[in-house]
Image: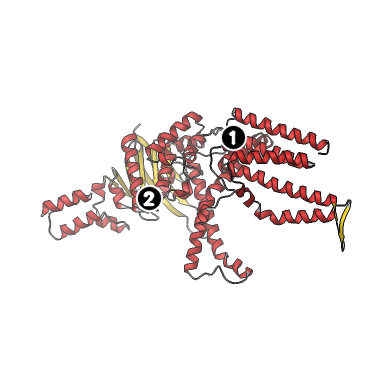
Amino acid sequence: MTDIIRTENLTFAYPADEGQQPHTALDGVDLTIERGSFVAVLGHNGSGKSTLAKHMNAVLLPGGGKVYVDGMDTSNEDLLLEVRSRVGMVFQNPDNQIVANVVEEDVAFGPENLGVPTAEIRQRVDSALKAVGMEAFMLHAPHHLSGGQKQRVAIAGVIAMEPQCIVLDESTAMLDPLGRREVLDTVRRLNREKGITIVLITHHMDEAAMAGRVVVMDNGKVVMDGPPREILVRMEELRAIGLDVPHTVELLHGLREDGFDVPLDAMSIQECAAAICEAL
Amino acid sequence: MLKDITLGQFFPGNTLAHKLDPRTKIILVVLYIVALFCARFFVSYGLVALLLVMSVKVSGVHPKALVKGLKPILFIICFTAVLNLLYTPGEALVSFWVFTITREGILQAFFMVLRLTMLIMGTFLLTYTTSPIALTDGLETLLNPLKKLHVPVHELAMIMSIALRFIPTLIEETDKIMSAQKARGADFESGNLFQRAKALVPILVPLFISAFRRADELAVAMECRCYHGGGGRTKLHVLRYAARDYFVLTGFAAVLGGVLVLAHFGL
């Protein structure tokens, strides 16, 4: 099976306050996420991207349609722990997802819950902390770490459960540029070296640009889906649903309007610079 | 500055007192308190005091730190001393107005002060040499048999460790909210007690709201990491008694025995 997560006509509505219409957050989402891929889900606030993320490890259960994780139906309660141990979640606020007083204890929390034997927990904690480059902080207190470091500890806590997929639900939104860099480099390495599937929920265009595939959501629907080079250059369409394009694309668009012959998909700064040089 | 406050100060170290299993230390403190309350007279008190002095020496904790711990209960100590001094019947030594100070009163007051002081010092020694996590862990394991009586031991230990984990976070947040309110012209330093208490409301309301939000998010994050209560959980650090634990436990038990014998003979 090549799909790790599959949704079929997924709908979900948040219960309404009295006298109001229930708010539809997801409206018929069909999405397949391939094993080992790096997918960015883009959308402005309220587009349903976080709601979608929460369906990927059964924090929310479908209002209609189905979600399959590794072939398992998430609405089957007997499979709940199985599903959650396969798809790990990293949330926005690093402070609100660290459980323990010491870094290593926090990383051990997931495996402890799964009933992994003590000797193996030790191994998993050590290798998870190494994988995020935090092994030197093993015995530190989490509140003395920076935001990026805390988020890496949270990722280590997920890796220690040996998941096949990690969903990052706006995990970089509260971080400074340096912290964002740290986290993104970490997840890219995990994707490349360990083959862990990454689903990156974000509204930063430059983060989406580094993914292998971009899914754009608006009003609870998937409106665009494809490689970043095809999606992120559609400036008008993206702007229409409240999203921006990467600065490089914007620059190239401007140059093109002024009659320069430049390609639109030179997304990275280096590529963009090279393309402009060539046009001159 | 506010950031470094913790509940029960812990001085990290590498002495025998630090290395003992937390369960051993909790049992030791219980034995010590029992011995303290069974002591009758100079000899038995002396024995318990010797035990305390030795424990302090071994732990490497500065005696000053222990004395500092007495400050908050100074009033209670003085109060008990005065009451015992004035209201113990017996052979009168001095008498003025309605009060009589007796020989027994002086002794009683002295022993009472000694008992309270040593009680506090002993328990402080426990928190000085044991990290809060180890303490929670030790308590959880020690109280495990109560699970059969449907006491939610694991849940209580989890609550305690999460509380410890969030103290620094919430203190930091309080700091931030205070600065934010001060920037809007709030005044926390002037006015009488009532006005100052009222000035705290704009701090407490946002603090509580954010604490509830944090709790909610933490619960979801814990669920995502497959937390489903205490059943079927394993541990990264499993507590194990070592030879030194048995050795020290035997020593303390012997002292308790000695105190009981001495007290029996009124010494």
Task: Give the quarter of the image for residue B55.
Answer: top right
Helix, strand or loop for disc 2: loop
Q: How many marks?
A: 2
Residue B33 lies left or right of residue A140; in this view the side is: right
Q: Is residue A262 visible?
A: no
- Residue shown at the point (64%, 32%) measured from the top left: B248
Question: In the image, what residue occupies the spot 47% across and 32% down?
Answer: A121
Kindly report which numbered mark, 2 or 1, lies closer to the viewer in this rendering.
1
**Residue drawn at (53%, 50%) of the image:** B166
Which residue is labeled 2 in the image?
A172
The numbered disc on residue A235 is: none
Farthest top residue?
Answer: B243
Residue type (three-letter) at the residue carrying disc 2:
Thr
Task: From the image, tell me which residue sits under label 1.
Answer: B20
Q: Chain of mark 1?
A: B
Where residue A191 sits: x, y (%)? 33, 38
Is B99 in front, or is A84? B99
Residue in front for this viewpoint, B91 or A67: B91
Describe the element under mark 1 as helix, strand or loop: loop
- The subunit letter for the residue under badge 2 reads A
Circle 2 packing at 10 Å, graded few (<14), some (14-19), many (20+), is many
Q: Residue furthest right?
A: B91
Q: Quadrant of residue A259?
A: bottom left
Give percent across and percent down for residue A180.
35, 49
Image coords of residue B66 (percent x, y): 63, 48
User: How does the figure colour the protein chain or chains?
Assistant: secondary structure
Residues packed near mark 1 inside 10 Å, few (<14), some (14 to 19) or many (20 plus): many
| Looking at the image, residue B212 lies above or below residue A116 | below
Distance between the alpha carbons at the discs numbered 2 and 1:
42 Å
Quadrant (top left/top right/bottom left/bottom right) for the N terminus of chain A: top left
